[in-house]
Image (cartoon, rainbow, N blue to C red):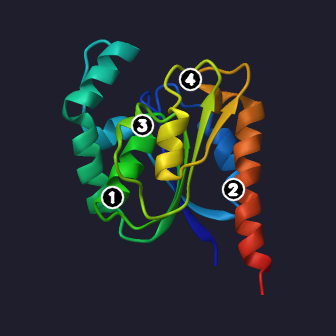
Amino acid sequence: MAERLVILSDIWGSRKGLWITSYLGYLQQYYDIVYYDIQQLSDIEVLIHSHENLNEAFLNGGLDTAIAQILKKESTPSHYLTFGFGGNIAWRGALKGLPVKSIYAASPSAIDMEKNRPDCPVMLLYGEYDGQIPALEWSALLDIPVETVPKFGRELYSDEKIIRMISLRLLETVMKKHYQY
């Protein structure tokens, strides 16, 4: 039986999310995938879809709404692959009882503001030029591995090279479990 993988989009949701189809292409034959557009989960509405307006909408209630929605929708223990604010939703959801097996979060926003860690394996991935890479002290204190990819920025997860890298890592995990005795 296939492992379940929940994918949470970035702040742009499906609007700028054509890259998500590459992840699906790599992963769908090995995982039972559920995808959420976090703009829809958060029930935010902005007149002008700029990064600043979306960011403000998420910080002013959108994140809380998305967390409440994911807690209602998801009751099956699953792995989470997340992008941007999607990582914050999975993280905080896990702290509130969301059944999470693992979190692989690419560029979660200001995650180092969190004081507690989810009770599951967590991997954080950032581009060198992201600007929100957690401090070493924070990652050591919470025992969270943080990987930084040189020469990439905030949306590194939309680059085909990074898509392939993340997908292969997730596939290695599922294959190891499949062939363990």
Q: Position of residue 100 (x, y in %)?
A: 45, 64
Of the numbered discs in the image, which one, if any, rests on residue 154? 4
150 or 159, nearer to the observer:
150
Q: CA distance from mark 1 to mark 4?
A: 25 Å
Name which residue type carries label 4: Arg
Name which residue type carries label 2: Leu
Q: Tag 4: Cα neighbours inside 10 Å, few (<14), some, or many (≥20)? A: many
Which badge, 4 or 2, comes first in the chain's sequence? 4
Q: CA distance from mark 1 to mark 3?
A: 15 Å
Residue at the spot of label 2? 170
Q: Nearer the viewer, mark 3 or mark 2?
A: 3
Name which residue type carries label 3: Asp
Answer yes or no: is residue 68 visible.
yes
Q: Quadrant of the N terminus?
A: bottom right
Q: Tag 3: Cα neighbours inside 10 Å, few (<14), some, or many (≥20)? A: some
Left or right of 45: which side holds 87? right
Discs 3, 2 touching: Cβ within 8 Å? no
Q: Nearer the viewer, mark 3 or mark 4?
A: 3
Which badge, 3 or 2, comes first in the chain's sequence? 3
| Image-quadrant location for residue 136 | top right
Disc 1 element: helix
Which badge, 1 or 3, comes first in the chain's sequence? 1
Left or right of 89: which side holds 19? right
Q: Position of residue 178 (x, y in %)?
A: 74, 76
Residue at the spot of label 3? 112
Of the numbered discs in the image, which one, if any, rests on residue 83? none
Of the numbered discs in the image, which one, if any, rests on residue 95? 1
Name which residue type carries label 1: Leu
Q: Residue at x 52, y 43 (%)?
A: 139
